[in-house]
Amino acid sequence: SHPERVLDLYPHELSGGMQQRANIAIAIALDPSLLVLDEPTTALDASVQSEIIAILSDLRKDHKTSILLISHDINMIRRSCDRVAVMQA
């Protein structure tokens, strides 16, 4: 929300949510057509999960980026994905 607050911090000093936001920013820096995300909301509280999903939704809409999302969180998948494939071992 306020980049100036975190500019002088080391990565390990960031919260989990801020680390995920930074990782997404790094991943989209080159404007990819496909973004592969493995468990992007794991270990984040519900409000931060919602923020991450909103960021990804905006990215998909505004930049026409396809997102391959890997997750065990069925509720999050149900809320945020338009196509689902289930893999079973």
Image: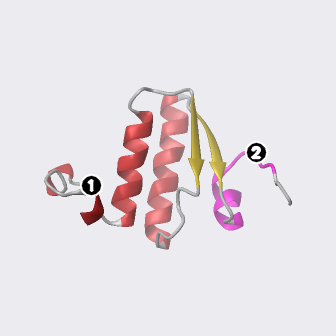
State the residue lying farthest toward the right: 89
Give how far across and how far down residue 9 sits, in percent.
18, 57
- Image quadrant in which you'd find residue 88: bottom right
Foreground residue among 47 and 40: 40
Q: Provide the residue span drawn in magenta.
A: 74-85
Q: Is 58 on the left-hand or right-hand side of 13?
A: right
Report the amino acid beneath label 1.
Ser
Give how far across and how far down residue 26 sits, in percent.
38, 39
How many C-alpha atoms fall within 10 Å of the one at disc 2: few (<14), some, or many (≥20)? few
Give how far across and how far down residue 54 sits, in percent.
49, 52
Q: Is 48 on the left-hand or right-hand side of 80?
A: left
Picture layout, residue 10 above or below residue 46: above
Report the amino acid beneath label 2.
Arg
Give how far across and how far down residue 42 sits, in percent.
54, 65
Picture layout, residue 80 above or below residue 64: below
**Residue at the location (40% across, 47% down)?**
23
Local secondary structure at mark 2: loop
User: What residue is pinned by disc 1?
Assistant: 1
How far apart are labels 1 and 2 at the CA level?
A: 30 Å
User: What residue is pinned by disc 2?
Assistant: 83
Quarter of the rendering occupied by the C terminus: bottom right
